């Protein structure tokens, strides 16, 4: 059986992988963006198959990204790449200024052939300082983050209950974790999932 990495490498090198839907390869959910490094990476060493930063330019199927360590990355999106921006999305939604995490296969020329790209993804914890039907004001380490409910997208997970579109059980003072999409250059986030321990 051909692995996801072999398919990606084949697609990038022109080995005839053809069009492969990301879901057929087992698309990675947003939680995987914050996963551990590859098992063959030494502790403390950079993971060569991972990149993060902000998009400087988009050309053809390649993203030029400036990492937080001031290193540039060329990230190629191929037929098998899964993209996330508050939910599964398409390459045309990647814009200069977007933040990203990307995981994939490092090619001989240094380009990262992306398995998954997460655009503007944030994973923050804090206390609810105010709540309305459309917004959660989150105190994150003394800074306010304004979290927007997005109709048809935002869900809550209460303790071990199944995900629900009902965010009305959240309360002021409650500690929550929010997975969402940052609105670049603001303190605002669109909510994908609110995790509540109660």
Image: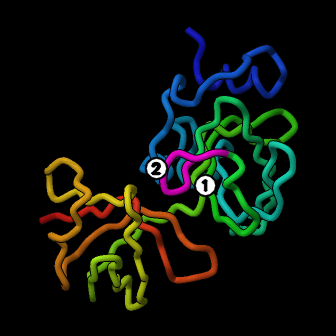
Residue drawn at the location 34% of the way across and 72% of the way down? 125
Span highlighted in magenta in the image: 84-90
Residue at figure coordinates x 68%, y 40% from the top left: 114
Q: Earlier in the sequence, mark 1 or mark 2?
A: 2
Identify the residue at the far bottom of this view: 142
> Image check: 184 left or right of 126?
right
Question: In this rendering, which labeled residue sits more in front, label 1 or label 2?
Answer: 2
Q: Classify 10 Å Cα crowding around label 1: few (below 14), some (14-19), many (20 and above).
A: many
Q: Quadrant of residue 6?
A: top right
| Above or below for 99 versus 89 | below
> Is residue 110 toward the left or the right of residue 81 in the image?
right
Q: Name the image quarter holding residue 3.
A: top right
Q: Determine crowd level at label 2: few under 14, some 14-19, many 20+ residues with C-alpha closer than 10 A.
A: many
Instruction: For the C terminus, give its image quadrant.
Output: bottom left
- 114 part of magenta stretch: no
SS label for mark 1: strand
Q: Position of residue 62 (x, y in %)?
A: 81, 46
Residue 54: x, y in percent? 71, 65
Q: Look at 73% across and 40% down and name the residue there.
A: 77
Q: Which residue is under mark 1?
A: 101
Residue shown at the point (22%, 75%) measured from the top left: 175
Mark 2 lies on residue = 30
Viewed as shown, does residue 155 lie left or right of 116? left
Where residue 69 appears, x then y in whole percent?
Answer: 72, 68
């Amino acid at each position: 059986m051909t692995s996801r990495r072999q398919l990606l490498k084949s697609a990038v090198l022109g080995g005839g992988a053809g069009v492969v839907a990301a879901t057929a390869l087992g698309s990675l959910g947003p939680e995987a963006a914050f996963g551990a490094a590859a098992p063959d990476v030494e502790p403390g060493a950079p993971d060569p198959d991972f990149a993060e930063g902000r998009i400087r330019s988009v050309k053809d199927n390649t993203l030029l990204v400036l990492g937080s360590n001031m290193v540039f990355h060329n990230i190629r999106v191929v037929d098998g790449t899964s993209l996330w921006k508050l939910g599964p999305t398409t390459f045309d939604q990647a814009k200069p200024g977007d933040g990203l995490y990307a995981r994939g296969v490092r090619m001989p020329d240094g380009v990262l052939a992306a398995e998954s790209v997460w655009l503007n993804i944030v994973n923050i914890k804090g206390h609810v300082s105010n709540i309305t039907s459309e917004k959660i004001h989150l105190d994150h380490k003394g800074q306010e983050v304004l979290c927007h409910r997005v109709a048809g997208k935002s869900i809550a997970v209460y303790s071990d209950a199944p995900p629900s579109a009902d965010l009305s059980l959240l309360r002021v003072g409650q500690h929550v974790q929010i997975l969402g999409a940052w609105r670049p250059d603001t303190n605002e986030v669109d909510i994908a999932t609110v995790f509540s321990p109660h």
